[in-house]
Amino acid sequence: MDELDLVRMIRRKAGKSRDLILGIGDDCAIFRPRVSEDLLFTTDQLIEKVHFRGDAPAAEVGHRALARSLSDIAAMGGEPRFCLVSLAVPKERGAQWISAFYRGLLGLARRTKTALAGGDLAHASSIYCDVMVCGAVPRGPGTSSQALRRDGARPGDLLYVSGKLGKSWDRRIQPRLALGVRLRGRATACMDLSDGLSLDLHRLCVESGVAAELDRVPIATGATLDRALHGGEDYELLFTLKPGDAAPRGTTRIGSIVPGRDGSVRFQGNLLPPRGYNHFRSKPK
Amino acid sequence: MDELDLVRMIRRKAGKSRDLILGIGDDCAIFRPRVSEDLLFTTDQLIEKVHFRGDAPAAEVGHRALARSLSDIAAMGGEPRFCLVSLAVPKERGAQWISAFYRGLLGLARRTKTALAGGDLAHASSIYCDVMVCGAVPRGPGTSSQALRRDGARPGDLLYVSGKLGKSWDRRIQPRLALGVRLRGRATACMDLSDGLSLDLHRLCVESGVAAELDRVPIATGATLDRALHGGEDYELLFTLKPGDAAPRGTTRIGSIVPGRDGSVRFQGNLLPPRGYNHFRSKPK
């Protein structure tokens, strides 16, 4: 199976979208934006031996590669529109691995109405993928966008998280897209947990220019408190609401936003250093 | 230098764009499309030991990573708007390599008015990059788009190429953005040459459902005819015009579109097999 055959196979299986004037097969995909929508863009790499083991099932790698980027769209309150998928695999993996990868990816794409608009296929010495997702949010009011950002948390806001934390890697991520849409116009700040609560909450506080106090954390079955605080790969939403705003079901209040040194986080009174997963730090801070 | 410091440095250097409501630093970038424009999307991988040697200067790798995707935007007649850059590097390369990579990339980004809207940084065992570019073309007439596609070549159209072919890898790619814009509403088909004339022309003919006859090829200084016909990495534009339409300066008429078996290409009377660079073919056809 050569590149043209593979691309033909992927093209047949790629979903359609009313916004995509032209999908796979040309130099670029052509997309027609809808009036009164802003577009969201995110990209996430998934790399063998860094993010997953070489013996992970190809369909699960495909699912995960898309799910991570969809989680970023959820964190901004967006609805996914389409994705571009870059994939490099060793020659010996063959077309079967690639087909299974796309089966996993396209299953999630269908369920979340994410069209596959294009991408790039190459050979490399180990598996590498990078998935870009475009999502959309309504505009307004005025010249603003309804996208949820990290920088709007203010002292007095209450801090929430969806689901339970500290889950193991070994499960299918379900991006919190419906929750993200429900939080539009309500959450003062929102982000997804991909590198661990302590580091991600630190980042949210830095962007918002505030500090946070954590009271408690919902721990997943079988997980430890340490893992719930510092483990990565939860893909839950971390968000803030004004006091008095009722939180959606399935979310837990874990603390509050306070004045203080930008980015400083306390857990049950003690300083909590940000030590989640950080690609470019060799030692914990 | 940890990931936060690196992202801060890149963020400072990233250009601004009036369409980008939010750039680097949140889960997604926020982009506001202009009325009456369609958007183009493309992504291209650049991988150590596949597309470049590990001792290639980092600034040139950065330039090339962006230039390849910009060439796809040029091929569709688009103007670049912004890019997302995914980069994975071995730990031992350090922040200096990454800084130089971004210096090369952002130099070209500034000259072509491509804002850096976001991306992803990771470690890996060898250098890997993937650059997504979003471009724009005017809409119309009617519900159509002014984007140049591969599928519009018809028998009788004349075939052109920009520049000279068979150039060596060792130079800075200059994406033909101005030429692409000039060809809007005129070229019946257009694509960029990235995998060699014989293979890329074959692809254009397959998409258009036509055949082609090549009369001659402009050969770059120091190159051979074989390299001009089958060498990859030219990044010139290959396009078709209706007879009687004067070709822009700097382009050469190389043949014509004829009826025939879809995708079949002849050079000076003889069948020319598509044997340019194909990632997923182990042997020439």
Image (spheres, coloured by chain):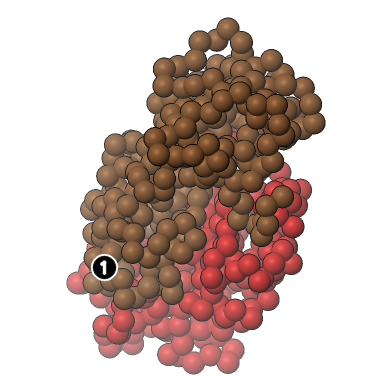
Chain colours: A brown, B red
Q: Please, what secondary structure does the residue beneath circle 1 have?
A: helix
Percent x, y of residue B187:
44, 59
**Which quadrant holds residue B200?**
bottom left
Q: Residue at x 51, y 84 (%)?
A: B166
Q: Nearer the viewer, residue B64 or B265?
A: B64
Q: Which residue is mark 1?
A: A95
Circle 1 packing at 10 Å, graded few (<14), some (14-19), many (20+), is some
Q: Residue at x 71, y 43 (%)?
A: B16
Q: Nearer the viewer, residue B264 or B243?
A: B264
**Which quadrant holds residue B126?**
bottom right
**Which quadrant holds residue A127?**
bottom left
**How many marks are shown on the rendered structure?**
1
- Residue lying farthest to the right in this orientation: A261
Q: Is residue B72 left or right of residue B221?
A: left
Q: Residue at x 30, y 62 (%)?
A: A98
- In the rendered image, the vertical position of residue A233 relative to residue B58, given as above or below: above
- In the rendered image, the vertical position of residue B80 relative to residue A234, given as above or below: below
Q: Nearer the viewer, residue A196 or B280?
A: A196
Q: Residue at x 40, y 39 (%)?
A: A222
Percent x, y of residue B167:
55, 83
- In the rendered image, the vertical position of residue B232 relative to residue B118, given as above or below: below
Q: Is residue A20 visible?
A: no
Percent x, y of residue A59:
29, 54
Q: Is residue A172 visible?
A: yes
On what subunit does the disc labeled 1 rest?
A: A
- Residue lying farthest to the top in this orientation: A244
Percent x, y of residue A78:
47, 30
Where, quadrant-wise, is the N terminus of chain A in this rendering? bottom left
Q: Is residue B264 left or right of residue A277?
A: left
Amino acid residing under circle 1: Ala
Q: Nearer the viewer, residue B158 or A133?
A: A133
